[in-house]
Image: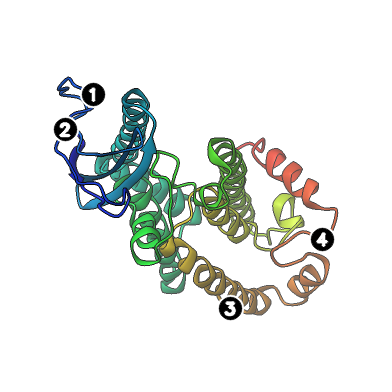
Amino acid sequence: MLATKVIYIRDSCPGQQGTDLFCGSQKSALLPVKYFRWRNAHCITIESTAGAVKFQWQKEFACCSELALSYKKESALINDFYAHYGQWGLVLLMVVVASWILYRYLAPTSWREWSRAGLVQAFIIALYAEMYGFPLTIYVLTGFFGIDLPLTSVTGHLWATLFGYGKIGAIVEMVIGMGLVFLGISLLVEGWREVYHASREGRLATDALYGVVRHPQYLGIFLAIFGQLIHWPTILTLALFPIIVWAYVRLARKEEVRMIDQFGDEYRAYQDRVPMFFPRWGEWRRLFEAGSSAGERPS
C-alpha cells in the first residue's frame, strides 16, 4: 500500500493560506488532500513513501476529478515499480540456472580459468540482484546524480528510459539484448561440444565454430554479457564488462602459447588462417551456420 504524506507549497500560490480540506466537499478514503485554492486551481505536492524511497509529485489541476485520475495513475505506476523488485527467490533461481550453464559448458580446470569464470559469476549475481532484487543503479541515478526517471516496471531498461523511448523502446532493447544473450549461450554450448569431440579423437579443434574463430566460447561470453548490458544495464555490470573482456583476452593468449608448445606448426598455421575472436567481414553467417550444424553432431 502506498502511504502518502501531503505537504503545503506556500510559494506555489502567492498570498494564499493553506487549508486542510478534502477534494470537493465530500471526504474520500481514496483521496484525502491538502491543497491551496487559487484561481480555481488546486496547487498540490504529494510526497509518497514506499520503503526507503521518496518522490515528489507537483502539478496544478483545474478540477478535483482531474486530480483524482492523475493521482490514481501515478500511484499505480509507482506500485508497479516496487512490485517488480524484492523478488529474492527469483534472483536465486536465475543465478543458479545461469551459473550452471556457465560452469557446465565453460568447464574450468586451471586456477586461471576458475578466476575468469568467477568474474562472469560476479556479473551474473550483480545483474539479477538488480533486475529482480534491489534497483541500486536507479537509486544512484535518481538520488545521487539527481536524474529524473519515471518509476515504472520498465525503468530498469535504462537506455530506453534515459532516451525517452518508453515501453516500445524497452521492448526493442529487450529483443536485441536477449537475441545476443541466446547467441552467446549457443556459442558457449556448441564450442564445448566441438572441443569434447576433438579431445576424444585426439586432434586439434579446427572445424565448425573453430573454423570461424579460434575462441568461440569466449566470444559467446562476450556476446552474452554485452546483450545483458543492452537489455538491463547496471553500474556494476558496466564496470565488470571491460574487466571480463581483458581477463579472457589474456587467458586466450596464454592458452595459445600452450597450444603452440603442444601442436607446433599446425597451430601456427591455424592462427594464420582463423581470427582470434571475431569473424572476418562477411563471415558472421558462417558462424551461425557452424553453430547450428555443430548441434547436429552425434554424441
Q: Which mark is residue 254?
A: 3
Give amino acid for label 3: Lys
Could you tell me if the residues under marks 2 and 1 are in contact, i.e. CB atoms within 8 Å?
Answer: no
Task: Please say if 272 is above or below 75.
Answer: below
For marks 1 and 3, give the one nearer the viewer: 1
For marks 4 and 1, give the one nearer the viewer: 1
In space, the residues marked 3 and 4 are separated at their CA atoms by 23 Å
In space, the residues marked 2 and 1 are separated at their CA atoms by 8 Å
Q: Which residue is mark 2?
A: 21
In primary-sequence order, the first of circles 1 and 3 is 1
94 lies left or right of 284: left
Corner quadrant of residue 31? top left
In space, the residues marked 2 and 4 are separated at their CA atoms by 71 Å
Q: Which mark is residue 280?
A: 4
Could you tell me which secondary element the residue under label 1 belongs to?
loop
Instruction: Tell me where residue 277 appears, x and y as whole percent.
Output: 69, 64
For marks 3 and 4, give the one nearer the viewer: 4
Q: Which residue is mark 1?
A: 24
40 lies left or right of 102: left
